[in-house]
Image: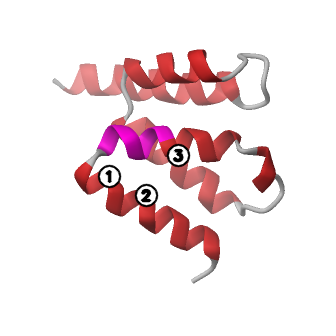
Amino acid sequence: MDKFEKLMQEYETLANTNLNLALEKMIDLYFDESYANSFNHEVYDGIKMWLYHEADDSHISYINSHYDRNKSGCNRLVNIIKTGIENKRHKT
């Protein structure tokens, strides 16, 4: 298991006790430039999958308050969350 898989496993474990905090940490990891070009696509896909299925409007607010909307990938991540929210609304 590489260090990134271990990190994601830690977030998954955290999600069992504090999903909101785990999702915020995943958002921070997604934008962390110190890991630029370090992750394979599976890590980013995993983060997007978690956010699609679990995030809500508070996570969009979190992104808006912590990151510049002009930052690479920011609008894409917000749109993934919005699509997930809409999908959940249509299922209920």
Region of the chain picked out in magenta, as a range: 19-24
- Disc assigned to residue 15: 1
Q: Are marks 1 and 2 in contact (CB under 8 Å)?
A: yes
Q: Quadrant of residue 90?
A: top left
Identify which residue, 56 or 84, lies in the foreground.
56
Look at mark 2 in the image and give the residue it sits on: 11
Label 2 sits on what residue type? Answer: Tyr
Q: Are marks 2 and 3 in contact (CB under 8 Å)?
A: yes
Residue 61 is one of the magenta-drawn residues: no
Q: Quadrant of residue 92?
A: top left
Look at mark 3 in the image and give the residue it sits on: 26
Residue drawn at x 63%, y 79% is 2
Residue drawn at x 36%, y 19% is 86
Of pointers 1 and 3, the one earlier in the residue sequence: 1
Cα–Cα span, label 1 and label 2: 6 Å
Task: Check the image and report above or below for 65 versus 10.
Answer: above
Report whether 91 appears left or right of 24. left
Residue 14: x and y, percent? Answer: 34, 56
Residue 39: x and y, percent? Answer: 72, 61
Task: Check the image and report above or below for 76 versus 4.
Answer: above
